[in-house]
Amino acid sequence: MSLYYLENKYLFWPRWKIIIYRLLFYFFLWSGLIICIIISLVSIKPYSYFGILLTFFFIFLVFRSRFSDYPLTEKILKKDRVNLGWFLDENTKNVLVEARFLSYYFKMPLGSSLIYVLLEKQEIITSLKYLDIDFVKIKQIKELIIQNFKNSSEITILKQKEKDFIYSLLLSALQKSFLIKQSFLNNYCLFLALFDLNDPTINNIFTDLNITLTDAQIGIIINLLSKQRNLNLISGISEIQNRYEKFKKRAKVNRSLTSLPTPTLDEFGLDYTDLAQQYRIGIMIGHNEEYKTLITVLSRPLKKCVLLIGQEGSGKETIISYLAHNLTKNNVPKPLLDFRLIKLPFTNLLQNITSPLDVTNHLSNIVREVLNNNDIILYLPDLHNYKLVTQEGGLSSLEILKPLIVSDLPLIATSTIEDYKKFLEKDSFIQDNFEIIKVNEVSEEEAIQILAFRSIDLERKEKITITYQAIKRAVFLAKRFLTNVPLPSSAEKLIHEALEGVKQMGKSVVTEKDIVDLVSVKTSIPLEISDEEDKNKLLNLEKYLHENYINQEEAVRLVASAIRQYRAGLSNPNKPIAVFLFVGPTGVGKTELAKNLAQVYFGSVKTMIRFDMSEYQDQRGIFRFIGDPEGTTRGALTEAVKDKPFSLILLDEFEKAHPKVLDLFLPLFDEGRLTDNLGEVIDFTNTIIIATSNALSDYIKKQIEVKVPFKELTDDLKKKLTNYFKPELINRFDEIVVFKPLTEDNLKQIVKLKLNNLTKILQNKNISVDFDDSVINKIAQLGYNPVFGARPLDSVIRHYIKDRLAQVILKGEIKTHSKIHFVYRNNNFEIITLK
Amino acid sequence: MLDVLNYFFFRIGFYLKDFLRAYFLGSFDFFNNNYWDKVLQLDRVTNLSINIRYFLVPLWRYYSVTAYFLSIIIRLTKIIFGSLVIIIFSIFYWFLYILWILMPFYLVIKSF
């Protein structure tokens, strides 16, 4: 274990000493160089020979003095005592010195002055530019730093304290240098190290800049990568298909001249090693574990077949193209040296065929060619296609491939989880001969890195700037709302779509707002950039719910309170947002409240997923919810939530489902996740689950009539509900919400609300309408049924009001800008036209 | 003031030592790494080592007497050609390095 210490006089000298040293050094350097050049040129023998020698030294000095004393190599870092000052380059030393002087001058802490000085450095400014922080913002921050300490008088920095600060800063910078692969402690490392200091002032500055350590690291990495020559690496796999024709026809022979020509494979295959050689494919961010396993399997002596399984766009192709890149760089284990990697999509075999037998013939030829050679890794995308296509006589394409699979040649195949379950999982040949590697989606940070990197290329091609915040937001929203496609593909699609939209609008920048608007349209959920409106909505949830919902104050209060607790972080985050059981007679507004909640909380009634539980009265209902074990049908519940992870799930008439079906909800209510038939874990933590039940309706009516307190009634109900549900299920509901039967007054209010909605519709047609109290009273009377509650209300309004209105509008009796009055008299609904 | 002068001479001493290290040891590393890079590139172009490795494997793996005969001739030609290219390159390359190393001594001797 090395001992790190800091010893560098120069860093802690007063200003005058530094000035004298610099004068002395640069005078020595430049005067020495000029004198030596003159002596060498004037041919004063023998001194000119010595002049030449010294000129070498001074030229060396000009360059050498800019770098650190030693590079950050393993050999030096393993020494017993390591001086952190050894690794500082000239520029970084001067930054530390300037920061010290600035801290004295403005009486500010060294951390603040250091960030001020770093924000003046071009490399940091460029890195921040990639994070959408422009020069104006940097200037504002710098002014803010100075303003904060302008009138300060308290700072007196002790020499030892100053040294301790720089020591701990450099120690952090050393760690950061490994992250961004730097061989000196330069300004990038210092900037990243500032995040580790936990200094409130510095943290505030980073908050103002709106960046985290990961952001800063990404900005710096992009800046460093953009300086590299082979930037066309980023064009990535999306480019391959366009250039496919161009490379197809080349003859392929390995360097050892031991391979036989492979004309059929060359015709139908695509040489990935060729593409990697030209830097057209090969970049990989994340997926390191999967790649390591792939290499291990491919280079072992026997059974070298790998099957990569993952969702479409999860990175299977990326891993394989990275292997191609490493094959061209000889950066693979010995058994794989001098191998070619050829992709053989099944669809290619179907090109220009005259009879179905052509596919079999071509495939047989390819198998023979690969077996005759010893230097080809065949890559078969969508392996299930080979199994599905069966020739006359029952021979599938996979059968033709079998000699190749059982040979000791390396082979890579891919499939999606769904297709694997459906077609390959039960195939014992596949299970025996293939090593299955599951490709997981990349993390959000990795997705941001990938997209930030790709955006540079996209910006160059499209001449449209994609802001870093837009990329971050795209990844954030894609992860939450577009869960059908894994990262980074889902976020990349969003960026591409937003880019097209921006192009059509004639704008030149894709901003965070463009992404948010796009996701809002795609998901029908109105999303906000700022969360102020969201908070306001939560605080006044009861008010918002009652805008379109009458009565049931207690139920609304309970629902609103549970949701507020969740959003304030007081509930278990590994559960659904809320799980309610709504009990009460039919037609009292249980479903209506659920609809309103979906509208208010998720922004649209379309986010409500409804299941009539009376349809799930037998055990098979489980498979209808999560999909059957054979993998032939997908689960209605799991698929719906995969499509809409932010949704309200309404389970109508919950008590009517089979007890085994109800058991399915135990882990779901408790842990917020459910595993479907394909083994995929579906996340329910962003859903509100509402189960409704008419059980004990008569009991509730009676208790409310005798005015039993609500709390007492709820507790009583909990006990009685155990006749219908298991106690462990009842305990998993956040709230059991009791709905009261509607009174006459409630009904009238509901009628008013519904007629108001009709008024609004007519207003859009420039027809103004008002309803007499007699109409409201009659509709309320007709719309109530002791068995169905207020359920007939809609059909009554439709029959007596809407139907009448439709007739007069179509007859032309009411024109635009008319004013009409609806009354009920002489046992009849009448329309009086006022204007 | 004295410590400024001390530090100055310390730095110049450090750079002088580093100059000698870089000139003799560093330049050897540079020449040597560069040499192997170039040799490997030439090997890739001339296929020297791969032909040595597969010397007894007939071309296209046609195991017949004619193929063996042709293969040995072709591989031998390739090996001789590749070896010649690499040997000539190596001679020129290391000659350049020797000149580089001897130059300071030559300059010092000529100076006095």
Image: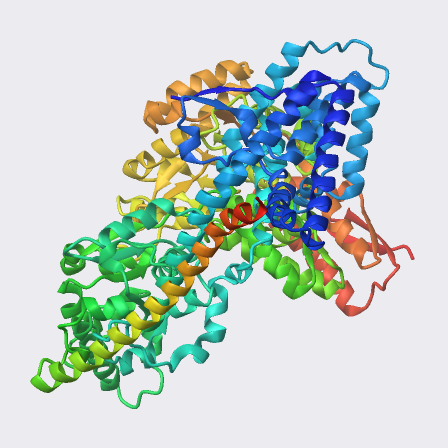
- Which residue is at the front of the view, A396 or A833? A396
x then y, percent, for residue A57:
60, 43
x then y, percent, for residue A834:
90, 55
Q: Residue at x 72, y 26 (%)?
A: A21
In the image, residue A114 sits, relative to residue B106, either above or below, namely above
Residue A462: image quadrant is: bottom right
Quadrant of the snapshot with the C terminus of chain A: bottom right
x then y, percent, for residue B79:
25, 73
Residue at the right extreme, as displayed:
A835
Residue at the left extreme, as displayed:
B65
A643 on left or right of A456: left
x then y, percent, for residue A492:
55, 55
In the image, residue A225 sits, relative to residue A356, either above or below, namely above
- Which residue is at the front of the view, A724 or A29? A29
- Which residue is at the front of the view, A77 or A376? A77
From where the camera sits, is residue A287 visible? yes
